[in-house]
Amino acid sequence: MSTIQPEVLADVPLHAGFYSFKLKQTADARALCAQVNALYQVGNSLIGFGQGLLDALERQIPGYHGATDVDGPERISPAQQCDFWLRLSGEDPGQVALLERSWLEALSPYLDLLERTSGFKHREGRDLTGYVDGTENPEDRAVEVVSMEGEQGIAGSTMLAVQLWTHQLDKFHSHSQGDKDNIIGRRESDNEELDDAPISAHVKRTSPSQYQPKAYMLRRSLPWADAGRCGLYFVCFASSLYPFEAQLKRMLGCDDGVEDALFKFTHPQQTAYYWCPPVKDDKLDLSAVS
Ligand code: HEM
């Protein structure tokens, strides 16, 4: 049976809050872990440990490191590594708000909230550009794609990369329908992949099978919108950080100087990496960090 946190494998929720925290200087990291596990519930919570929290616990997770800026020929993808990450989910914004209230109150002795983003499922799972997001996810072998190997406490844990993207939708919609389809590499109308898409098309840059080794990941991103600004809260899981790092570099044009056409209208901020502990008997198995 899989020990991956069930919310990794579940479909994207209808509503979610994404929270990034910094550990307070005086916080007792072990007491924080106990508090997190008391609050953790299968069905509505998803947890990631960042570098600062692992350092405070004096534990290392094989293959894990905090995110750093990535330089491409045209731009930088900036990192903002935090110490603890949380996603709360529900079927309506009220459910998320009530969960948020109890989590934030209970975590406040240990953590300062640095960022909060509200995400939502748009139609059947579309980005705010209108394109379906998640079509090529390897759902049929998701456990294999995301599960780390190792001893108990590591086996069935997973690596997480998150990235807040801000869209300029006016720029996107200034392109013709054909050009928009070429930016993504799929037709918006029927979601079919374009055989003749340019090499800058997003799916041409990221198709996992073209990487050596192959760079499979499970994406669970959600759109966000706030006071006229909007974008995608990109979330992906894999058994190591390699698929995300390799794909981000290729999107930036680090390999061949060709940038992902997504950069014509959207920009990443705040990349961070987290380690998501496994579960045992519906609670987090924190034996690797205790
Ligand atoms: C604003 C940011 C992004 C948007 C709007 C976006 C949107 C999309 C869309 C519409 C697709 C096609 C349908 C699908 O298979 O899901 C797609 C595919 C994909 N994206 Fe993204 N994406 C974004 C960022 C990223 C990032 C940062 C990565 C990895 C570093 C990534 C990795 C992938 C992968 C692996 C695929 C599947 C490619 C294939 O096998 O055809 N995406 N994305």
Image (cartoon, rainbow, N blue to C red):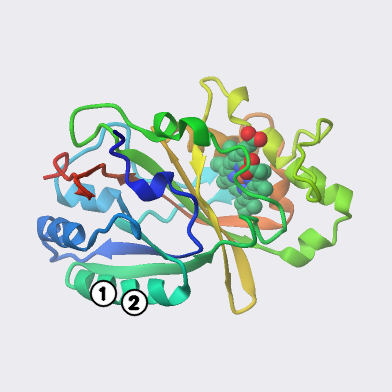
x and y percentages locating residue 86 in the rendered image: 34, 59
x and y percentages locating residue 233 in the rendered image: 53, 58
x and y percentages locating residue 288 in the rendered image: 16, 39
Element type where label 1 sits in the image = helix
* Mark linked to residue 74: none
| Nearest the eye: 25 or 151 | 151
The residue most toward the top is 212
Q: Is residue 74 visible?
A: no
Residue drawn 75% across the image and 38% down it: 200
The residue carrying mark 2 is 98
| Nearest the eye: 26 or 18 | 18
| Nearest the eye: 179 or 66 | 179
Image quadrant in which the N terminus is located: top left
Decide: marks 1, 2 in contact (CB < 8 A)?
Answer: yes
The residue carrying mark 1 is 102
Task: Check disc 2 and give the amino acid type.
Answer: Leu
Element type where label 2 sits in the image = helix
Image quadrant in which the C terminus is located: top left
Residue drawn 73% across the image and 64% down it: 169
Left or right: residue 135 compared with residue 272: right
Left or right: residue 87 compared with residue 32: right
x and y percentages locating residue 138 in the rendered image: 53, 34
Left or right: residue 95 compared with residue 12: left
Q: Quadrant of ligand 1?
A: top right
Residue drawn 84% across the image and 31% down it: 196
The answer for how far apart the CA atoms under marks 1 and 2 are is 7 Å
Sort mark 1 into few (<14), some (14-19) or many (20+) by Cα contacts within 10 Å.
Answer: few
Task: Check disc 1 and give the amino acid type.
Answer: Ser
Q: Residue 103, relative to residue 220: is it above or below?
A: below
